Image (tube, rainbow, N blue to C red):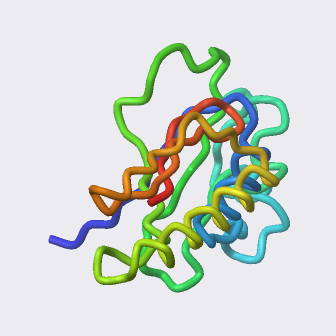
Amino acid sequence: MEMTVQLTIDCSDPQRMVTFWAEALGYVPEPAPGGHATWRAYWAAVGVPEAELPAGAGDIPESIIDPAGRGPRVWFQQVPEPKAAKNRWHFDLKVGGGRDVPLDVRTQRVKATVERLVKAGATVLRIKDEPDMGLYAAAMQDPEGNEFDVV
């Protein structure tokens, strides 16, 4: 049985999330299929009733894809309610290179990624600087408050 995986993330502003997470993951906004100018045009062409599409839905990309085709598609589904509690899942952005890479090199890689993502709209929650354990990592939040780690 063949299977693909899509990660769906509820959010209030899909465009903001597409922009941020494309930057964070090295993904690209997913173009509308079949030569359609927008996803909304595609959905209309395949018969999705206008009443089922919220205002603005599909006018801009609401999903991102791995340009190398290795990672899952990520769809940002617009919902009316705000995030209310801590995530039960999170991304670990593994940029350090693993324990075979010297801690000072991993630390610099994490710091550079944290700086880039703060400029893109993330917030640092805490830094985990534990050299005795060979650890340097950052706990962060995306623009809508979803937690993720950079290690």
Whether 105 is drawn above or below 12: the answer is: below
Q: Position of residue 76 (x, y in %)?
A: 61, 44
Task: Spot the residue most to the left.
Answer: 1
Q: Position of residue 86 (x, y in %)?
A: 45, 22
Q: In terms of depth relative to the viewer, which is nearer, 68 or 114?
A: 114
Q: In terms of depth relative to the viewer, which is nearer, 131 or 29?
A: 131
Whether 71 is drawn above or below 117: the answer is: below
Q: Residue at x 62, y 72 (%)?
A: 26
Q: Position of residue 99 (x, y in %)?
A: 29, 74
Q: In terms of depth relative to the viewer, which is nearer, 6 or 126?
A: 126
- Left or right: 21, with 137 as reference point: right
Q: Residue at x 71, y 34 (%)?
A: 53
In the rendered image, the quadrant that contains the C terminus is bottom left
Whether 79 is drawn above or below 3: the answer is: above
Q: How many marks?
A: 0
Whether 8 is drawn above or below 116: the answer is: above
Q: Residue at x 65, y 48 (%)?
A: 47
In the rendered image, the quadrant that contains the N terminus is bottom left
Q: Position of residue 30 (x, y in %)?
A: 67, 67
